[in-house]
Image (cartoon, rainbow, N blue to C red):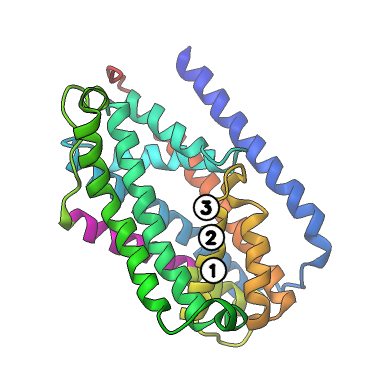
Amino acid sequence: MKRSILRVIMIGLLLLASGYFLYHLWGNFHQLPNVVWNKATVVALSLSVLGTWVTIALIALIWVLLLRDQNVQMPYLEALQIIAVSQMGKYLPGNIGHFTGRVLLGKAAGVPAGKTIATMAIETFWTLAISASFTLAALVFFVHDLHQGLVDNAHPVYMAALSIALLLAPFVGIQVFNVMLPKLSRKLGRGALLVRPQLTTAVMVSLLMMLCFAILGSILELQAISLFGHGEGNWLQLTLLFTVAWTVGYMLPGAPGGLGVREAMMMQLLTPVIGIEVALGVSLTMRATSMVGDASAFLLGMLFRPTQKKQPAI
């Protein structure tokens, strides 16, 4: 009975998130440039959805690595199923549904909620560290109007300092938390203090996160060329500029999956590079293919949910 109720809730959330997206798409559809539908178009869209699946798989691997540092061993396929299902929560108003979903699904799988929260905090810090590096690199090298007013010759030093600070934050933060609030740390850690991440984990996770952004940049370039006929562009430039838009959408609370925010930033940053029509087109098709990828991953995750019940973690 509980499983049926959960399935109904999950499907309802999917429909709600999909409806919210379609509402915004309909309002801007008349400005979308024409797309020539052929085999190349279908291949490009299919590869875009596949790219979304790959990023979900990488996020699951990141979570497994972070849990391992907390002395929690989770099978990769089980982590992948949880991430695939919980990811759809990011499209709900509030932009925190995917975090809540991961805690609840992880708890049902036997992962202490406190350790899931700790790993998500570390993941968030390191995601912001990598995206900040990409964002500031874009400001230095590609956003020329901002370069004149905001960026000086010392800016790469600030960029490096910010990235290093965010990368080190989980190491220092967990140590301070354990010293200042040991009882709460033990409660969250199910009797043991939360564990600082290993340096090797930090390196591996950082590389995986950079790979995620590289994949998203590749999808953007593929769509600009294959769907809207834009000439071959600068892959690094497009990747860095997209990361700026992604970061703003990620950090702004309340925007479901950065919906509307990311697209607005893409329009502003990409228009000087690929033109306003192509910028509008890829902002919508990037959102559409990522939504299809997330939704299909969600459905696959629901389809392959483990049948064996586990004792929920305290």
> Residue 221 at what x, y percent from top left?
54, 76
- Do tag 1 and tag 2 residues touch (Cβ < 8 Å)? yes
Q: Which mark is residue 193?
A: none
In the rendered view, would you say 310 is above or below 269? above
The amino acid sitting under disc 2 is: Trp
| Element under disc 2 | helix
The residue beneath circle 2 is 246
Q: In screen coordinates, is 111 left or right of 89?
A: left
Residue 21 in view of the camera? yes
Report, in whole angstroms, how far the alpha carbon at label 3 lies from the one at label 2: 6 Å
In the rendered view, would you say 164 is above or below 305? below
- Do tag 3 and tag 2 residues touch (Cβ < 8 Å)? yes
**Tag 3 or tag 1, which sits nearer the N-term?**
1
The residue beneath circle 3 is 250
- Residue at far top of view: 1
Q: Residue at coordinates 34% horizontally, 56% vertically from top-left?
A: 166
Q: Which residues are magenta?
A: 201-216
The residue beneath circle 1 is 242
Q: Residue at coordinates 27% horizontally, 48% vertically from top-left?
A: 170
**Number of marks:** 3
Q: Main secondary structure of the magenta part?
A: helix
